[in-house]
Image (tube, coloured by chain):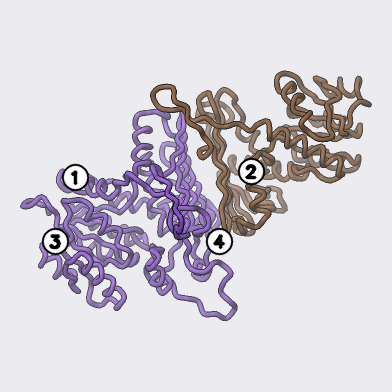
Chain colours: A brown, B purple
Amino acid sequence: MVRLALVGDGERADQLTSLVPRIEDAEVTVRATSVDQLLVDESTTFDAAILLAAAGAGDCEQLAGAGKHLLLPISSQLSTEAIQALGDQCQQQGVCLMAGGTDRLVPALQATWQSLAAGELGEPGLVRLHRWSTVESPVTVTDDLLRDLDLVLNVCQALPTDAYAVARSVRGAAEPDYLQVHLGFDSGAMALIDRSSTLPPGDGYFSFSVIGSSGAAYADDHLNKQLVFRGEHPVAVGTGSDDLAAVADIQEFCRAIQQQRAAVVSGADWLAAAKIAEAVSESIASGSAVSLAEGRPS
Amino acid sequence: MTAESTGKFRCAVVSVVKHGYVPRGVAAHPRFELVVVADDADQPDWVHERNQAFADEFDIPYVKNVQQAWQDYDVQVAVVSSEAERHCDLSIRAAEAGIHVVQDKPMSTSISECDRLVAAVEQSGVKFLMWNRNYLPALLHARQAIEEGQIGQPYAIHVDFYFAKDSGPPKGSRADGEPVTSWLDHQIAAHVTGADGGVGKEPMGELKIEGIYPLGYIQFLLGARVQRVFARTTAHFHQVNVDHDVEDLATVTLEMEQDILGTLCIGRIGAASHPDIGEIKIHVLGTKGALVISEARPEVAIYYRGQPAEEFRHRRVGMDNDYLLMENFAQAIDNDGSTVLDARVGREISGTVQAAIESGRTGKPVEVV
């Protein structure tokens, strides 16, 4: 049984607590609002910590130093150096580090991974990803980019050779709210990502397609909408699977701990995405393509 | 020239070496009458055979002398659907003879030829239409939504244009020492499946063969000229593309006028990759909303026992592109207006394609000239 500590509060913490009973051999033994509180009061009552919000390097180091396995949202709050250091520390301590909330385990994409792994799609040639969010839940597009880069990397199974990116501040904010990323790989494969946070209040949009040498997969919100009629034009409504993705994240985390293996989205995966995000930022600033030598902008 | 006496335009089909979708589209409008097929006498036998077959199908004469055909049949419109490298030459000759032109894609295999065509069309005052798909129902709907301001000011556009067709054997299928099939021979052989869009002597990738369609959509929807591109290109699917060093898959970052951004994904991705002709989608982001448009819709799904594997399961309906294009062309002639994709816009699109190919080769952003 993996004893889980949930660090965070609010509705999301309640929701995750209610989901954990669905997970085999895991239970929430403690909830805390901060890592400090957790380690002072409850350090012996849990094996692994799930952080609901992006954490600073200090919190992560404390938990890993205490021998606690760690699941936290992938984020650019940590520098590549800090991610590298945290990964090294976790390895030395023999604890599992997993970057969560990456979409790697959402149902539609799991079907895509299965098809890729079975060789049905052949050699990947193109990954195309659109992710649009709303103004009511603003994200800095470059901050949340790691999730998308992780998905691309999982298809191509290699670091890109170069990155070209352009960004705009459509609504006039200091940070861009629109971003396009164009990646190339040694194999000849390529990827295009566009991210926007300018949709009006309501649902966002996500589309992910993989074009391979012998097949293709299209995971697209456009194809997964139901119609609701309530006057004038019907409304297209998505059928949510957020809970399933959250359950899958925690399940994978617990299995990786029990099987003493790296989690599906490991510290190394997080680091790879973060290095590309650095190149993306550099490309936006320079207006030119940035070459990545051994995964680092050069 | 105008259709003063009958209201009808007399059209010469000036070479028809592909599967004839352009002259068939022209004939879909009651004001356009195909009266003759014409070509130069010095063309090879396979060209004459295809011209003759089309003439026989439409029960019109085939004349192996273009100028003679124009004179003898009082031609007002030339419908050019030859090999790509002959497109501009035939269109320029028509324009210089005062004949309006409807031309198949690509505009040309060379930018200098495109420039020569623009000059000829503008000097002669004839009307020119590059064949396109801008009047498909989904495109018209998208344009209406944009014009009505439903998504605010557009700031980004993305087009996926994947043709789920094969182009001969897959990449890696040619054994060492096995001779390379010439591009032209491959295209001639592909005629039977209709996958001969790149017919001609000069090898062309998907950007050149099909790029006019998605880039035409962008121009039609936003009216913004592409200023700078960054592209990745590769031959990922087909041996013929590998052998001739032309792409069958490309991605292009587009930087446009009015600070609009965009991307294009284009490829001939193989018949196994989609149940129909391919995933063709348009995404438009605006300051107040967004559009996600499937170019194929409206369509009807039809499945039945014994259905051939290669038959599309989804059939497009409500298609009026051919008629509407030709109505646009007729209106341009009648009212001395411009066509929905005229020579100058066609040249701009060709410039974007050329820049993308160069960017794919160099790995650097390229300004569109």
Res A177 seen here: no
Q: Position of residue B179 (x, y in %)?
A: 52, 80
Circle 1 crowding by C-alpha within 10 Å: few under 14, some 14–19, many from 20: some
According to the picture, the residue beneath numbered tag 2 turns out to be A109
Q: Position of residue A42 (x, y in %)?
A: 91, 22
Res B305 seen here: yes
Q: What separation in Å lies between label 4 and label 1 (alpha carbons)?
A: 43 Å
**Residue B331: mark:** 1
Q: Position of residue B80 (x, y in %)?
A: 26, 62
Instruction: Name the residue at 41% across, 56% down.
Output: B210
- Asked where in the image residue B67 lies, by quadrant, the reply is bottom left
* Chain of the residue under label 1: B
The label nearer to you, 2 versus 3, is: 2
**Could you tell me which secondary element the residue under label 3 belongs to?**
loop
> Badges 4 and 3: C-beta atoms under 8 Å apart?
no
> Badges 3 and 1: C-beta atoms under 8 Å apart?
no
Q: Quadrant of the N terminus of chain A?
A: top right
Say if A36 sits above or below B61 in the image.
above
Q: What separation in Å lies between label 4 and label 2 (alpha carbons)?
A: 23 Å
Circle 4 crowding by C-alpha within 10 Å: few under 14, some 14–19, many from 20: many
Q: What separation in Å lies between label 2 and label 3 (alpha carbons)?
A: 57 Å
The amino acid beneath tag 1 is: Gln
